Image (tube, rainbow, N blue to C red):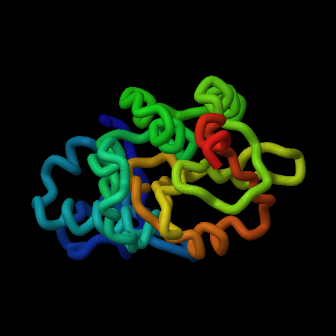
């Protein structure tokens, strides 16, 4: 990106490869200021270790296997990382219901997400989960904090966060409930599916 990045020295597998002028110390910690030229000079193994270590600070990489009944368009992205930052949980959920591939790489605002649900004919329901449902977690002001797409069998297509260190992955209902337990749950269902039920 051609700009500096500051990371803890502890993330580096071999601190001896870091030029001393890039290490900054204070009473609390030692950090490395990475710049483009310095990055290019680091051994590949050091870069690989650093990126993996940094990524695991954002996500533990634990996920569920992609179920056979998962829609084909989700299988392409499930349990993978993006190549760019920006995509958030709202974008991933809109992609799941629309199969519009461009949206999975975008950052989506909660109001835009709500409009997307309406355009896709999803309505708020008071019922048990059904495959194809969208679950949102909202704060006390009614603002959506997280959203996920229900595949079935207590599994969801999900994305935590908006960096490329946050993968699109298959997670369990129990994990989502625990992660977002301080928020209210809302369930949305396609009008067509609601009529069938």
**Left or right side of 39 for 196:** right
State which quarter of the image contains the N terminus: top left
Q: Position of residue 72 (x, y in %)?
A: 30, 46
Query: Looking at the picture, how far across and down is residue 117, in whole percent?
Result: 64, 33
Q: Quadrant of residue 23?
A: bottom left
Q: In which quarter of the image is residue 15?
A: bottom left
Residue in the foreground of this view, choosing between 102 and 124? 124
| Relative depth, front residue between 24 and 111 | 111
Q: Is 165 situated above or below 189?
A: below
Q: What residue do we see at 53% from left, 49% from top?
A: 132
Q: Is residue 51 above or below residue 112?
A: below
Residue at screen point 53% across, 69% down: 154
Q: Nearer the viewer, residue 88 or 172?
A: 172
**Residue most extreme to the right:** 141
Residue 95 in sight from this viewpoint = yes
Query: Residue 166: x, y in percent?
Result: 43, 55
Q: In which quarter of the image is residue 6?
A: bottom left
Closer to us: 110 or 69: 69
Left or right of 130: which side holds 3?
left
Instruction: Give the residue displayed 42% in from the left and 72% down from the top.
Output: 60
Rendered position, 110 above or below 160: above
* Residue at 46% in and 63% down: 58
Total labels drawn: 0
Position of residue 125 measured from the top left corner of the image (x, y, whole percent): 76, 48
Q: Is residue 9 in view from this perspective?
A: no
């Amino acid at each position: 990106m051609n700009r500096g990045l500051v990371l803890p020295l502890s993330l580096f597998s071999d601190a001896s490869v870091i030029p001393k002028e890039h290490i900054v110390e204070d009473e609390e910690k030692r950090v490395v200021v990475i710049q483009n030229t310095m990055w290019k000079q680091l051994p590949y193994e050091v870069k690989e270790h650093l990126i993996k270590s940094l990524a695991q600070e954002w996500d533990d990489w634990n996920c569920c296997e992609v179920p056979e009944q998962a829609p084909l368009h989700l299988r392409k992205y499930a349990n993978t990382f993006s190549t760019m930052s920006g995509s958030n949980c709202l974008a991933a959920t809109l992609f799941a219901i629309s199969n519009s591939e461009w949206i999975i790489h975008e950052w989506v605002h909660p109001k835009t997400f709500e409009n997307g649900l309406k355009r896709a004919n999803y309505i708020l329901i008071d019922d048990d989960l059904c495959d194809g449902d969208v679950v949102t977690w909202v704060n006390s002001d009614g603002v959506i904090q997280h959203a996920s797409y229900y595949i079935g069998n207590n599994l969801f297509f999900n994305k935590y966060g908006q960096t490329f260190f946050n993968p699109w992955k298959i997670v369990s209902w129990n994990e989502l409930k625990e992660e977002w337990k301080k928020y209210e749950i809302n369930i949305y269902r396609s009008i067509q599916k609601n009529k069938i039920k």
